[in-house]
Amino acid sequence: MNVIEKNEGPKLAYMAVGNVLTLGDGEIALRLDKFERDTDVTIYVVRDDGGILATSIGDSTEGKCYAAEIFVPARQYIEIEGPAVNEQGEEVRETTREPLPFDMDRVTLTLWALL
C-alpha cells in the first residue's frame, strides 16, 4: 500500500493486514478487495465534530474534517486465448478476460493531520 502524508501533524493510526485496512484504534476496518470495481473507487474517511470516524464514497463529506482518503484503482484483467466452439459446431479461438487477484500494493492511503 502506498501512503501519502498531505500535511504536518499527527495522523490517523492505520494497519494493513492482508486485504484489510484498519483505521483509528480499530474504529473502522475495511476489506478493500470488496471495494474493487471496473472503475476507480475513492473512500473518504472523515472525523465528525464528536471525533467519530465515518466513511463515505462520493461527495457527502461536506462539513466534516478529512482524516484519510483511500484510493482503490480499477480491477485489472488478463486476456486468455483458448479454444471454443461456435454456433456451427466449429472449433475457434476465443479470448476471455479473467480478473487478476486484488493487489494491496496498488492501493493508495492519503492521510491528513488530525485537528
Image (spheres, grey):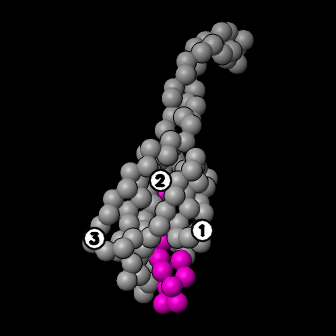
> Circle 1: is it few (<14), some (14-19), or many (20+) Cα within 10 Å?
few
Q: Which residue is under mark 3? A: 7
Label 1 vs 3, first from the N-terminus: 3
Secondary structure beneath label 1? loop
Secondary structure beneath label 3? loop
CA–CA distance in space, label 1 to label 2: 20 Å
At x 33%, y 59%, the residue is 4
Q: Say whether residue 39 is left or right of residue 93.
A: left
Quarter of the rendering occupied by the C terminus: bottom left
Of discs 1 and 3, which sits in the foreground? Answer: 1
Question: Looking at this view, is 88 or 83 the one in front?
Answer: 83
At x 48%, y 90%, the residue is 49
Q: Which residue is under mark 1? A: 26
| Percent x, y of residue 84 | 66, 16
Question: Looking at this view, is 14 or 37 the one in front?
Answer: 14
Against 114, is 89 above or below? above
Q: Which residue is under mark 2? A: 72
- Whether residue 67 appears in magenta in the rendering, the answer is no
> Circle 2: is it few (<14), some (14-19), or many (20+) Cα within 10 Å?
many
Boundaries of the magenta span = 41-53
Q: Amino acid at mark 1?
A: Gly
| Percent x, y of residue 63 | 42, 87
| Percent x, y of residue 65 | 41, 81
